[in-house]
Image (spheres, rainbow, N blue to C red):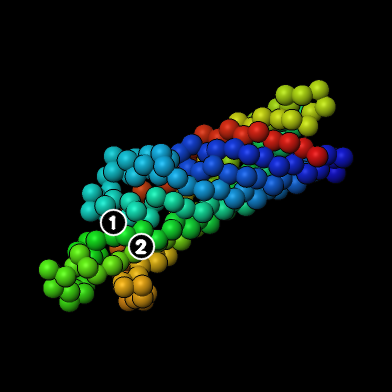
């Protein structure tokens, strides 16, 4: 192990998250955990890109509130190579939680094909919230370089790509979960959104301090 075998980073993945990272280093490998948040304008970009790729406006309207804010988690391992082992590449596992946001009851009925038996004049008074938990697998590559004489202060530049592998919707009607509706939504969202359009990619920049 290096004498400087632990580091902390503060960075951003555009347009995915702002994060804090913890890194463990050996001569040829690095392991890390990153905790981040998804907020506007990144969430707006994600929805806009999804719409341009062909996701139906109905689904965009239904999930947009869930994308207002999210907790993002990533665990990865990277192989370091090149001069001073500055280059690195490796696999990454992502687990994200998109917080519950209001969604129209009429859209829930339209997307699931299930009637909630709510009179139209009362639909605005019936609350529905939708959150999501997603899992993705991907690859991250980058270059790290020192900006100080003691090599403790560094800058990271990265590129990453990932594909959603599963999701779990967290739909509540009047603050109660409905297992049947969530199962239906899981199937619909996977088929209509995440199976074909569930790709994540971005450019990353971070400041890193090595102890």
Classify 10 Å Cα crowding around label 1: few (below 14), some (14-19), many (20 and above): many
Residue most toward the right? 3
- Quick one: quadrant of the N terminus? top right
Residue 11 visible in the displayed image = yes
Instruction: Give the x, y percent position of residue 26.
Output: 80, 43
Q: Residue at x 81, y 43 (%)?
A: 5
Q: Residue at x 60, y 31 (%)?
A: 157
- Quick one: quadrant of the C terminus? top right
Say if 177 sits above or below 111 in the image.
below
Q: Which residue is mark 2?
A: 130
* Disc assigned to residue 70: none
Instruction: Give the x, y percent position of residue 61.
Output: 26, 52
- Badge 1 element: helix
Q: In the image shown, does 27 or 112 lie closer to the viewer? A: 112
Q: Residue at x 12, y 68 (%)?
A: 121
Report whether 128 appears left or right of 72: left
Q: Earlier in the sequence, mark 2 or mark 1?
A: 1
Instruction: Give the x, y percent position of residue 116.
Output: 21, 74
Instruction: Give the x, y percent position of residue 166.
Output: 45, 61
Report whether 163 appears left or right of 150: left
Residue 204, by quadrant, is top right
Residue 87 visible in the displayed image = no
Residue 41, by quadrant, is top left
Q: Which residue is mark 1?
A: 62
Do the numbered discs 2 and 1 sit on residues whose CB atoms are within 8 Å?
yes
Q: In the image shown, does 126 or 47 lie closer to the viewer? A: 126
- Badge 2 element: strand
Separation of marks 2 and 1 at Cα, in angstroms: 8 Å
């Amino acid at each position: 192990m290096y004498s400087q075998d632990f580091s902390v980073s503060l960075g951003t993945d555009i347009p995915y998250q702002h994060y804090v990272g913890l890194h463990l280093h050996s001569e040829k490998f690095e392991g890390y955990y990153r905790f981040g948040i998804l907020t506007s304008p990144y969430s707006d970009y994600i929805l806009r890109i999804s719409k341009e790729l062909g996701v139906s406006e109905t689904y965009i309207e239904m999930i947009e509130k869930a994308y207002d804010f999210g907790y993002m988690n990533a665990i990865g391992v990277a192989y370091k190579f090149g001069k001073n082992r500055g280059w690195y590449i490796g696999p990454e596992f992502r687990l994200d939680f998109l917080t519950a946001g209001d969604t129209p009851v009429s859209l829930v009925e339209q997307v699931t094909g299930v009637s909630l038996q709510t009179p139209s004049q009362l639909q605005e008074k019936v609350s529905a919230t939708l959150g999501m938990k997603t899992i993705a697998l991907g690859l991250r590559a980058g270059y790290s370089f020192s900006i100080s004489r003691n090599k403790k202060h560094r800058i990271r530049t990265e590129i990453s790509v990932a594909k959603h592998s599963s999701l779990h919707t967290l739909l509540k009607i009047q603050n109660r979960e409905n297992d049947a509706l969530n199962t239906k939504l899981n199937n619909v969202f996977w088929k209509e959104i995440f199976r074909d359009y569930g790709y994540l990619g971005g450019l990353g920049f971070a400041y890193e301090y090595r102890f």
